[in-house]
Image (tube, grey):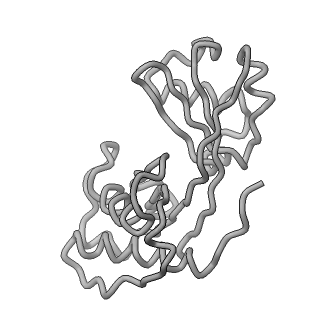
Amino acid sequence: MPLPPDTELGDILLSRARQAIAHELGAESGAPGDDPRLSERGATFVTLKRDGELRGCIGSVRAQRTLGEDVLLNAVAAATRDPRFPPLTRDELGKVSVEVSLLSTPEFLEFAGEDELLRQLRPGIDGLLLFAGCRNATFLPQVWDQLPEPRKFLAALKQKAGLAPDRPASNLMVATYTVRKWKEP
């Protein structure tokens, strides 16, 4: 089960993400909030939306740097380096909403085939990380909102990794994780 949201930490992460983007775009950014938890290792995804549509999403699946640094770098990357979108402009900054997801440590699943893998998935709860050789991809748990059927969710994730949607799951490594997420109002 996902951990309950920590509102104070969420506010700090959202503020830090927005301020990092504003600073990168040369806009007024203010001083970022501080909290001892920001110096702990953490893995985040920062998602930007404009008018309810995705405008950028970049993140980390492993906690390799401090939480404060991770959210800052992922926020700037989501705004300026998501290959699916042109870089965010300063004029757009006030029109986008920020969401920060804090990932748990991924746990690898053991399964003999696709049906066994699909039975282990928890729609709406699990993020999924897929590895096939040097290819990999992930879907945050929020993607279940668009793809609620596990078989379609997995097929779309395979496709995102550059694999055939019908590629046998027995040739893949799969891990799940949960998130605590916060959105700007």
Q: Residue at x 56, y 36 (%)?
A: 129
Q: Is residue 89 above or below residue 80?
A: below
Left or right: residue 171 compared with residue 13: right
Residue 86 placement (x, y as % from top left): 26, 51
Left or right: residue 91 compared with residue 47: left
- Which quarter of the rendered picture does the N terminus lie within? bottom right
Asked whether 84 or 121 is in front, the reply is: 121
In the current view of this chain or complex, which residue is farthest to the left?
26
Q: Is residue 167 above or below residue 56?
A: above
In the current view of this chain or complex, which residue is farthest to the bottom?
30
Q: Residue at x 52, y 38 (%)?
A: 138
Asked whether 18 or 9 is in front, the reply is: 9
- Which quarter of the rendered picture does the C terminus lie within? bottom right
Left or right: residue 126 compared with residue 162: right
Residue 102 placement (x, y as % from top left): 55, 60
Q: Residue at x 73, y 25 (%)?
A: 117
Asked whether 85 or 76 is in front, the reply is: 76
Total numbered labels placed on residues in the image: 0
Q: Is residue 82 above or below residue 33?
A: above
Residue 97 placement (x, y as % from top left): 46, 69
Q: Residue at x 61, y 53 (%)?
A: 104
Task: Report which quarter residue 32 is drawn in.
Answer: bottom left
Q: Is residue 107 above or below residue 58?
A: above
